[in-house]
Image (tube, coloured by chain):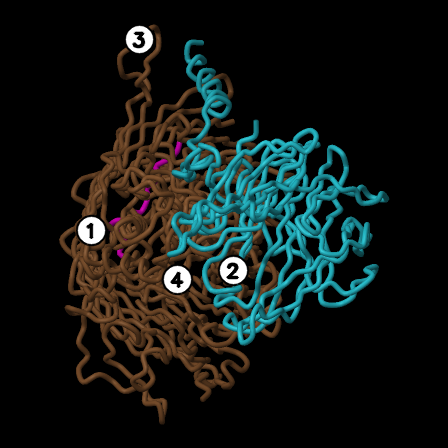
Amino acid sequence: MRRFLPLPALLLGLAIANVAPMAAQSSGGLIGRVTDASTGEPIAGVEVRLDSNRVIARTDRSGEYRFRALPAGYHTLAVTWPGYRPATRDSVLVRAGEIVRADIRLAPTAVQLQDLVAVGVQDPILDPLATQTVQRISAEDFRRLPVSSLEDAIALQAGVVGESFRGGRVGQQAFILDGLGVKNQLDASTNGVGIRIPPDLITEAQIITNGYSARFGQALSGLVNVTTRDGGDEWTGRLAYETDRPMSGTADLGLDRLVGVVDGPLFGRVTAVGVVDLSARLDFDAVNAPSAVDPRDPRFETPRPLPHNSGETWTAAGKITIPAGERVITRFFGLMSTEQQYLYDQRFKYEPDYGPGRRVDGSLFSAHLQLLPGSGTGTPIVGDLRIGRFAREFTRGAVATPDYTFGAFTGSRFDIRGQDLARSQDTTAAKNPVPGFTPTELTDRSPWGVPAFFLGGASTGEISWNEFSELRAQLDLMIGLGSGADLYVGGLYAGQDVKTFQRIEAALPVGGAIPPATASNFSPTITGAYAEAQARAADLGFTIGVRYDGFDPGGDLNNATVGARSTINPRAAVSTVLAGATVVGSVGRFSQPPDLQYLVDAAFDDSTRTGRFRQGNPDLGFEQGTQFELSGRIRLRENSNLRINIYTKNLDGLVATAPIGVNPDSSRFVNADVGSVIGGEFIFERERANGWGARLAMVVQRAEGTVTDAFTLSRLIRIDPNTGDTLPPPAKAQFPLDFDQRLAVIAAFDGEIPADRGPRILGVRPFSELLASAVFRYGTGLPYSRTDITGDSLVSEPNGSRLPAQWTVDALLRRPLRLGMFQGGLYIDVRNITNRRNVQAVRRDTGNPDPSEAYLNTIAEQAYQANPQTIPFESPRYRRFADTNADGRIAGRDELFPLYLSAARDYSQALFVYGPPRQIRFGMELIF
Amino acid sequence: MTACRPLAASVALAALLVAGCSHSDPGVTGLDTSDGPLDPASPSRLTYSPITDAWPGYSPDGDHLVYTFERGGSPDRCLGVLPGGGGQRVAEVCPEVRPAREGIEHGAVSPDGTQLAYTLHTGGTSDNFTVVTAALYVAPIDSVSGARKIFDLLVNPSGAPRRWDYLLDPVWIADDEIAFIGAQVSYVPPAPFADPDTIYTGIDLATVRIGGSTPVIDVIANISNAQALSYDPTVQRFTYLRDGAVYTIARGGSEQLAFTLPDAPGESGRGITGVAAGGGRIWITWITSMAIGTTTTRTTSSVSEVGAGGALVTLASRTREVGALGVISDQGRWGRLTAAGDGSRLAVEGLGGPTGSDIYLISLP
């Protein structure tokens, strides 16, 4: 069934649509009025130059000038005009999605008045046109807070739990980079976007969680909007190295990170910026698990680092900015990142070279052509044409740990077994045992020797690969409608390519218990169009928009030809100022296409609590959500403000797996689940002034939803095996969603000692300019479901139990240093400073991280019964300590079973249910 | 310029961190494994499996000792490789699927200790194993998945004078050359209505060179009834047992009688059961029987070195006494021998008795 809107309807929709906030963009606006300082009269025709003449605007008859679509960040404003003294201002901060006002009073040269300028900036807290709930991460935050990545910084924002925004599922957010939408549409619910933005490239990042602009789609719960910086007018650079090498023992997680960034003018007005960010850690996914209880377990004395658990990320990015004339700017951006990681697998604890590994390669190349408005008095129009190609390749399989070249850096790409077969997608060849693979064996290298639990000799034979690429074209127009209104219109078209391949037990031929390899190759398309208007009348602001989203899976999938589908999503906001506070009410309808992985057959776990083998459903429709929010912002004092957001969100059509008939092993993806979130956010900020700032955010929230799980939990929704129709449950009972964190508190403080303060020791003030910051995070426990010992049957309501609360304290100390033309600094960054052992998961049968003794005895008994044979002295499985009668044989239950029990306890010890341990990193940087 | 000092110090610190501080090494600590025999007293028992351990064979340098062991369920035979002085297996080759339809036997470790030669027999069910195919293979000692077939048995290999049903006692005589006894197999019922015994009859002493793209077989001698082949690199001669006597032969030379047991008065019987050579020395296992009184027969099995002039220096002995009412005592007997090429080590099968079939290390004087 084709669901595309007919073109006339689309055009009509665009025609009747109005307004949209500038918010959620990578750029902001700068407006102001140039007046004669002596008379107060406006000066018309004055050239206002920005950033060394890179952009020039001219005042109109009322003295007003306007720069639209400026990259967020600091800009230099300069005005020269005959008869007046030149005026400049170095650091005008333009924030994405906001219009900053800078009025300029020019002093006549014949008049002895104070030099120039009074610059007034629109207060972003009280600006009634800022209708979005935006939390900002500035470049300064990256320097002053204990964060080292964009992900770290996002985690400090209210409403963010891991990769969940406001209680939604993972993958319900979209990523915007310099105005270009980037989303891993293939498997966003289970994997990240695949590219890493070096913090040194970021001017500002925003987390937007309410009725964001109709300009953006492919998201239900939020946006991550990142603006990268342009190159400057002078060559500058930064080199940094951080490590935990001075630590020893378990405190040494094997970290090394190298960062280099340089930017400056290439020629003329063309500038460039380039960043290389390389990091590696021997314990990439470090956990604060207790030591093993058995002295023979290698984790008894050395709980960290885990073997085969290292990882590295390589990122290189660059940007070239080419102004052409006064009205056209072209930007070329490129970013490539690779993250490869050895994955610790308890089964391969004693033969880690057969453990799995994964690699994610991501790249983004884009071109941005920006047309700025002319200096005339006509209707100002800003046009942005963006074309970008985003690609992401994921590979997982067995990979042997190589010799490291430096720290945890390998210096090469992982050679993941079977990756060439996967890329060829040759399912016919994959029917046979794949060359190079052999069946696994129960290893003889554990301290217990017995053939149980621990594998070795070969990998499990898993080959998992997918590739997602997208070529996206996006046109955005901003049309000024006088001084009080703006109109935004635009659209996008994205052609995507999806390829997947999966094979398990590659050492064995397909057949019997070995399922065939799965592969898919299809080319979906995504279309979008929007119109949005923003208007202001006195203290009242309106934002009204509508967005059209289309999605076509493309081609035949699972032997079914399906058509395109579409949605219309209106969004609106109204804001005003009441008693000194800005109050905003917003409502929006949002939609996102389902993960493309759900369109094809699949067999892996994901956050929707499903697993095993599932039938793809090419006819899946959009997942949708509606959010209402009422927010208030008030400035308590000059440098402090309070924001309160009350919101409710209804989710509908979420992808779930429903059993076909009554067979749980035959299931299908359907748009079956619904959910709701209600919550409040309270954010107090003491903006940085006089060397210090603070922020306190508290979130109270309840997130619930239906739970459709074909395999273990609550089979409330089924599919009629005859008609294929979804059979709804008798009642839409809702249970806590996975990221239903009821209370979260985040407090951050940073302060800096002035340069001329602090005790002087031997002619030096060692504490002057010392920067200190601390972040405290607290969150109540997330829900989980209790099951019986088999894990197949619930013993209470879905997500009816709660994990313990978690909290951490992070801290940063930074001391700048100078040497001639060079500046530098030293810093110590400590995460989880109290080494708090946070429990992030538990066993569903016990409610604790550890298994019960009954469970251990059960699996030990099963293992013993499977291999009760005598172990003679010459066998590699022989352990002298277990040969209690010293007859050269470990024989009989009395000698063998204790080994099986120890092996069961070793194998079942909880590791990744704990959060990270204390991490201390020492850093040094050189700025030139 | 006091402010310079911290920066200079920081640069120095960075260099120091990288150069002087290494990260902790993630990995698995050592296991509680044993090196050397459980009991070093000679003869030192090397294997304790309750099932059969047999066919010991030293590598030329004596660093590895390969033997055949069973996991239970004939013909589920594997090869194990022990350190030359005993300890726990450093490598093993077993049939991949159980119940096995394969038998892996007659192992030999190459001079450099990196390769393993063996025969692989495939047949019907494990309950009724009839050899269908058989071949000589060579594989890396640590990865039999890289095995390559050298030539098939049960057919007439290229360069061979006749069909060999079986291949006995392979031994590496160079990095790329393996010597063996090509044998025929017959199945002879020991008595009417009894299951037939498998009789191996050596017919050819041959070598195969495996360095080229195709194997080259070289028949050194046509020797009927030969068994227990060993090669002494010190004197570059093959030693074997034939018709109750020990013979040696050099490539291109003729067979020479090396040793035969003299008659001994009072004994009811005696015979050589195994032979090995290395370092210019020869050892044998042999057995004697004599009556003790009127109703008891004592059988003594010995491991002895053949000394100058044929004098025997006994290194270990086992006895078995059988009376009128049955077995009185049984220490078992000694079976096949193997010696390191330089004569530094000697291992022997211990058969029967209370411990079954196991491998022992004999201390040499």
Q: Is residue A280 above or below residue A62?
A: above
Quadrant into which the N terminus of chain A falls? bottom left
Q: Earlier in the sequence, mark 3 or mark 4?
A: 4
Q: Amino acid at mark 3?
A: Ile
Q: Earlier in the sequence, mark 1 or mark 4?
A: 4
Q: Colour of chain B?
A: cyan
Q: Amino acid at mark 2?
A: Asp
- Give the label, 4 or 2, closer to the camera: 4
Q: Residues within 10 Å of mark 1 (few under 14, many from 20)?
A: many
Name the residue located 39 percent from the left edge and 54 percent from the top edge: A451
Magenta stretch containing residue A121, yes or no? yes
Dot 4 corresponds to which residue? A190
C-alpha separation, residue under disc 3 versus residue under disc 4:
54 Å
Q: Earlier in the sequence, mark 1 or mark 3?
A: 1
Q: Residues within 10 Å of mark 3 (few under 14, many from 20)?
A: few
Q: Amino acid at mark 4?
A: Thr
- Both marks 1 and 4 on one chain: yes
C-alpha separation, residue under disc 3 versus residue under disc 2:
56 Å
Q: Residues within 10 Å of mark 2 (few under 14, many from 20)?
A: many
Name the mark on residue A139. Answer: none
| For the residues bearing labels 4 and 2, Cβ distance under 8 angstroms | no
Q: Which residues are magenta?
A: A116-128
